[in-house]
Amino acid sequence: MGALTGRKVLLLIASESFRDEEYAEPRKALEAAGATVTVASSKLGTARGMLGGTAKADILLRDAKAADYDAVVFIGGSGATEYWDNKAAHALAQDAAQADKLVGAICIAPVTLARAGLLKGKRATVWPACEGDLKAGGAALGKGPVERDGKVITGVGPQAAGAFGKALVEALSK
């Protein structure tokens, strides 16, 4: 039995150009710890990563309900901009936060959390080109590759994917 047996995690990926390792490494860590992972996207079927990898979307973003999961995690990559101003993505993140669930985002995906109003007064990190978006959303920029502030975990980019996955597992284990 893994530490996360019985825990459910939703990974939200872009329908095109998600970042392969930001999806694969956290998923591997979560599943190795016993969590059940479901993948959501704006389109069903196969999504293609920036490096050519693929992932199967199990459910549509619009059908995902935060109440069904212990954590909701937004995966980065250039395609993640599709969720920055997406009302369904904002509602999913807000619902998860209001229910005191873990919310995560890596690379440029923390911009979605900032625009959803979840990073006000929180320490967070993001891909360097998007730091202004986090500041505009009221976040305090952290210096680490992965930042955790309460139930919000953010990662800076592909080089932090392993540490981001580990932080998700640690947070869900408590």
Image (spheres, helix red, strand yellow):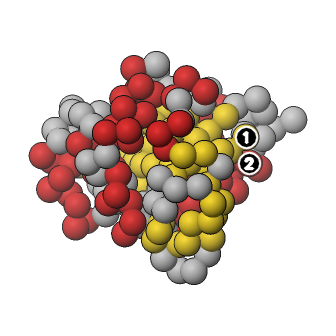
Between disc 2 and disc 1, the foreground one is 1
At numbered mark 2, what does the secondary structure look like: helix, strand or loop? helix
> Which residue, given by chain and number where applicable, does mark 1 sit on?
36
- Whether 87 is drawn above or below 82: the answer is above
Disc 2 packing (10 Å; few <14; some 14–19; many ≥20): some
The x, y position of residue 80, in whole percent, is 38, 60
User: Are the residues flagged by discs 2 and 1 in contact, CB closer than 8 Å?
Assistant: no
Asked whether residue 151 is in view, the answer is: no
Mark 1 crowd level (few <14, some 14–19, many ≥20, 10 Å Cα): some
Q: Amino acid at mark 1?
A: Thr
Determine the CA span between mark 2 and mark 1. 6 Å
Q: Position of residue 148 (x, y in %)?
A: 41, 40
Question: Relative to the observer, which residue lies in front, 85 or 51?
Answer: 85
User: Is 114 on the left or on the right of 46, as rendered?
Assistant: left
| Quadrant in the picture for the N terminus | top right
Residue at image coords 73%, 40%: 36
Q: Check disc 2 and report the residue beneath it.
A: 31
Q: Amino acid at mark 2?
A: Glu
Q: Residue furthest right?
A: 1
Classify residue 20 by image quadrant. bottom right
Disc sitting over residue 51 in the figure: none
The residue under the point 18% across, 53% down is 133
Residue at the limit of the structure toward the bottom, as seen here: 52
N-terminal-most mark, 2 or 1: 2
- Name above or below for residue 22 compared with residue 42: below
Residue 146, position in %: x, y? 42, 52
